[in-house]
Amino acid sequence: MANKLEEGMKAPGFSAKDQYGNEVSLGDYAGKDLIVYFYPKDNTSGCTAQACDLRDNYQLLKDKGFALIGISTDDETSHQKFSSKYDLPFTLLADTDKKIVEAYGVWVEKSMYGRNYMGTARKTFLINKQGIIVKIIDKVNTKAASKQILDLLSN
């Protein structure tokens, strides 16, 4: 079981390929505020609603000074199709080896239709310019994910 991350802790470093095959790491965002959101799977209803809500409010988040990264265990090809289909203007990282989801403690046991399996918990981390986790959203509202973030930022 991965360590439980808490607000005030340093965000674990990561490096993975984006939807275009480029290597992206947490260090690339040093000196920037960053939203890292973890989601279970490309092209599923909840994940699509969340990605499209973030897309529709992306400029508002950028205006607040934030960069945005989505991470799931899907591969680059899946991310590329998902990103193209919904015209997503932000980076999606392919964590196929599950190193990032484990480092962030979001690779968890889930249950559906009485069957237990391992999967990615939907969770959002707000990381400041110094690489410190300032907010964690555990219960993400897929249809209003950006509002949840913006509400936290205004408090």
Image (cartoon, rainbow, N blue to C red):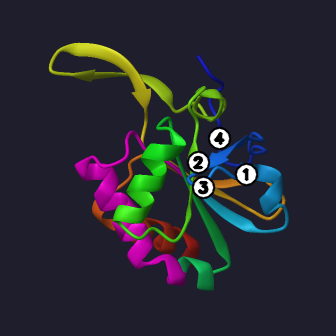
On the image, the x and y values in percent for residue 62 come to: 60, 79
> Separation of disc 2 and disc 3 at Cα?
9 Å
- For residue 4, side relative to residue 148 (left or right): right
Q: Answer with mark 4 or mark 1, whichever residue precedes in sequence.
A: 4
Q: Secondary structure at mark 1?
A: strand
Identity, as a three-letter code, of the amino acid under mark 4 = Glu
Position of residue 43 relative to residue 95, above or below, is: below
Structural crowding at the residue carrying mark 2, measured as other residues with C-alpha within 10 Å and reported as few (<14), some (14–19) or many (≥20) = many
> Separation of disc 3 and disc 1 at Cα?
10 Å
On the image, the x and y values in percent for residue 143 come to: 28, 63
Q: Main secondary structure of the magenta part?
A: helix
Q: Answer with mark 2 or mark 4, whichever residue precedes in sequence.
A: 4
Q: Nearer the viewer, mark 4 or mark 3?
A: 3
Report the residue marked by disc 1. 24
Structural crowding at the residue carrying mark 1, measured as other residues with C-alpha within 10 Å and reported as few (<14), some (14–19) or many (≥20) = some
Q: Secondary structure at mark 2?
A: strand
> Is residue 148 something that shows in the picture?
yes
Identity, as a three-letter code, of the amino acid under mark 3 = Tyr
Report the residue marked by disc 3. 20
- For residue 73, side relative to residue 16 (left or right): left
What range of the chain is rendered magenta? 37-60
> Separation of disc 2 and disc 4 at Cα?
22 Å
Q: Answer with mark 4 or mark 3, whichever residue precedes in sequence.
A: 4
Per the rendering, the mark at residue 53 is none
> Is residue 142 something that shows in the picture?
no
Residue 44, magenta (yes or no):
yes
> Separation of disc 2 and disc 1 at Cα?
8 Å
Per the rendering, the mark at residue 93 is 2
